[in-house]
């Protein structure tokens, strides 16, 4: 009897243990805590049409060859062009007088990541075989997501997304992650009115350590787990962070002279502390500071060049609305070059080929180029007003009018020109239209001839509109060292390495306090700010763009500062001009 009882106890214990193991296994299978750590997903969309470009004449025909494709080219006078049959690229260029060189632009297909085509410069040189040879280097079309997962003190598993290209984690507001078997779900935060809703669903492959998320930015992304000892660009410079040691920037073939911080009267200790702070920046939320680059020049010499999060000097960076200052600079360069345009030129007259359209209302007749430059057009446009019919986002994403010039010119006037300055991106874009009409040249060609060439800028990417016009409301991409030349050009009184691009008067006037937008000072597409410095005030002018793009000149200190960042649509984007310049950079200027 005792034996049977003992056997029964053993059997019961075995069943209990088996059930416990099953429950433990189920809990582990359903535990989101096992997903804790860093996950990374990268997708490259192309373009694959790149590399060597050959143009040759065979008999009476012209041919172009790129990426294994051969197409006919059209030659008319000194112009040459061709287009790939599948729409994946085209070229527009011109021969020089001796036909030994072709200068032009490669037009790459619209990027998957933002739907925009870009124009980039290409130079082809004739060789002894009567072949013109050049290299096409299109803008890479890629997208990256980082998913950071951490177990919270209350046992829930928190998560957030970082996205360096567009900061989409700011809009896909992930709060936590849950798992049931292979299924994973990313939830929004609980609110007073509803329990957190599911933002993204996916599956977890434990064997491959892969997490696939569906409908993430209208696509599927495969995330791989990043090992704890593996470097990742989500961090400023890896983990754990090291000790920063300053070194002067190298001399390159880009026109910049270089020197050390001490050579130009800047405290090495002060700058090293600032850069170390950038290196040590924690990435613990979607709003964490994401600084991509910091550059400083003084007395015309580049003395600091530091990059973070995998960015580098050879990678073009988005300038967003900071490129509006490029638009104003191009106006000044055009006037200096003799193009028939003045700040008093009537907008509708220039855009209509020299005469006003019939029955044009008086306020539109009074609209001048200067009003577009200082954002006081009076047109019904306001980028900050979601109901404004002329706001940039409506024009880019919702309007059925592909011609942005027609879209802008058709807007109603709601106030007199010059009465009030309101920030609206269609105004500098319309400036680009006036430049095209007055010069009879495309905006990429104008940029190349009047800005890029003189400033020794060899690589840039101008976004194009649906009608093929350069978009001048923002978004031109430059190498970081190149874009900061705009501020140096104005500090120099309009010259770069002895070449005159602007008049001294334009350099001074366009960067001066001319109007106010809200409570902020503004010039011709340049912001103006006053900073305290050693018991006095110094004036700064700067190009400012979403995400933390800043190129700033401070005339009294003969100083240029550039910041590039990835905090798009986030308050952290304002830290460079509001915090880093007054609290870290200026105190390091010794003399």
Image (cartoon, rainbow, N blue to C red):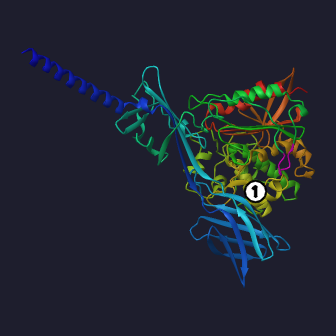
Judge by depth and name the residue closer to the eye, 453 or 387: 453
Span shown in magenta: 251-257
Asked if one can make out residue 201 in the rendered structure from this viewpoint, the answer is yes
Q: Does 96 lie within the magenta span?
A: no
**Residue holding disc 1:** 434
Judge by depth and name the residue closer to the eye, 414 or 126: 126
Quadrant where the image shows the C terminus: top right
Would residue 143 be found to the left or right of residue 531 on screen? left
Q: How many marks?
A: 1
Quadrant where the image shows the N terminus: top left
Judge by depth and name the residue closer to the eye, 350 or 278: 278
| Residue 181 image position (x, y, % from top left) | 34, 36
Residue at the outermost right position: 498
Would residue 271 be found to the left or right of residue 113 on screen? right
- In the rendered image, the vertical position of residue 110 relative to residue 54, given as above or below: above
From the image, give the main secondary structure of the stretch colored magenta.
loop
| Residue 447 image position (x, y, % from top left) | 78, 56
| Residue 319 image position (x, y, % from top left) | 70, 45
Element on which disc 1 rests:
helix
Q: Quadrant of residue 288?
A: top right
Residue positioned 54% across, 33% down in the render? 228
| Residue 233 image position (x, y, % from top left) | 61, 39
Asked if one can make out residue 556 in the rendered structure from this viewpoint, the answer is no
Residue positioned 64% across, 44% down in the render? 381
- In the rendered image, the vertical position of residue 359 relative to residue 275, given as above or below: below
Residue at the outermost bottom position: 59
């Amino acid at each position: 009897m005792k034996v049977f009882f003992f056997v029964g106890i053993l059997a019961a214990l075995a069943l209990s243990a088996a059930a416990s193991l099953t429950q433990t296994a189920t809990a582990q299978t359903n535990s989101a805590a096992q997903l804790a750590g860093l996950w990374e997903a990268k997708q490259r969309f192309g373009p694959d049409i790149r590399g060597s470009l050959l143009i040759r004449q065979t008999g009476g025909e012209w041919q172009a060859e790129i990426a294994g494709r051969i197409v006919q080219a059209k030659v008319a006078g000194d112009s040459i062009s061709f287009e790939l049959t599948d729409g994946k690229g085209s070229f527009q260029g011109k021969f020089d007088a001796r036909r030994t060189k072709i200068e032009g632009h490669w037009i790459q297909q619209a990027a998957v990541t933002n739907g925009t085509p870009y124009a980039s410069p290409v130079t082809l040189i004739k060789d002894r075989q009567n072949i013109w040879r050049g290299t096409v280097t299109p803008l890479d079309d890629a997208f990256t997501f980082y998913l950071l997962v951490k177990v919270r003190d209350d046992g829930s598993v928190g998560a957030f997304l970082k996205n360096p290209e567009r900061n989409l984690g700011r809009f896909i507001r992930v709060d936590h992650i849950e798992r049931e078997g292979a299924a994973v779900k990313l939830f929004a935060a609980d609110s007073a009115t509803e329990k957190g809703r599911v933002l993204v669903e996916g599956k977890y492959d434990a064997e491959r350590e892969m997490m696939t998320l569906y409908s993430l930015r209208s696509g599927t992304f495969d995330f791989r787990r990043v090992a704890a000892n593996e470097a990742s660009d989500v961090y400023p410079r890896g983990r754990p962070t090291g000790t920063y040691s300053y070194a002067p920037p190298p001399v390159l073939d880009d026109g910049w002279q270089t020197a050390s911080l001490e050579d130009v009267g800047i405290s090495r200790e002060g700058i090293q502390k600032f850069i170390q702070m950038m290196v040590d920046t924690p990435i613990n939320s979607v709003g964490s500071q994401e600084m991509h680059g910091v550059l400083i020049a003084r007395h015309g010499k580049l003395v600091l060049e530091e990059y973070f999060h995998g960015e580098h000097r050879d990678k073009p960076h988005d300038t967003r609305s900071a490129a509006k200052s490029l638009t104003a600079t191009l106006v000044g360069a055009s006037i200096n070059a003799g193009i028939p345009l003045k700040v008093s030129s009537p907008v509708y007259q220039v855009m209509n080929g020299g005469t006003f359209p019939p029955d044009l209302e008086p306020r539109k007749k009074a609209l001048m180029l200067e009003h577009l430059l200082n954002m006081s057009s009076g047109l019904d446009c306001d980028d900050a007003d979601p109901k404004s019919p002329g706001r940039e986002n409506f024009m880019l994403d919702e309007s059925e009018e592909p011609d942005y010039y027609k879209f802008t010119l058709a807007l109603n006037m709601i106030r007199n020109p010059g009465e009030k300055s309101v920030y609206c991106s269609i105004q500098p874009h319309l400036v680009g239209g006036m430049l095209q009409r007055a010069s009879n040249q495309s905006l990429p060609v104008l940029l190349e001839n009047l800005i890029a060439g003189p400033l020794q800028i060899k690589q840039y990417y101008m976004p194009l509109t649906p009608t093929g016009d350069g978009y001048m409301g923002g978004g031109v991409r430059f190498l970081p060292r190149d874009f900061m030349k705009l501020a140096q050009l104005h500090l120099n009184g309009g010259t770069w390495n002895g070449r005159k691009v602007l008049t001294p008067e334009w350099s001074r006037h366009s960067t001066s306090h001319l109007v106010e937008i809200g409570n902020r000072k503004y010039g011709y597409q340049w912001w103006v700010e006053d900073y305290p410095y050693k018991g006095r005030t110094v004036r700064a002018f700067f190009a400012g763009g979403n995400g933390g793009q800043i190129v700033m000149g401070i005339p009294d200190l003969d100083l240029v500062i550039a910041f590039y960042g990835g905090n798009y649509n986030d308050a952290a984007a304002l830290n460079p001009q509001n915090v880093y310049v007054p609290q870290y950079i200026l105190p390091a200027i010794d003399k």
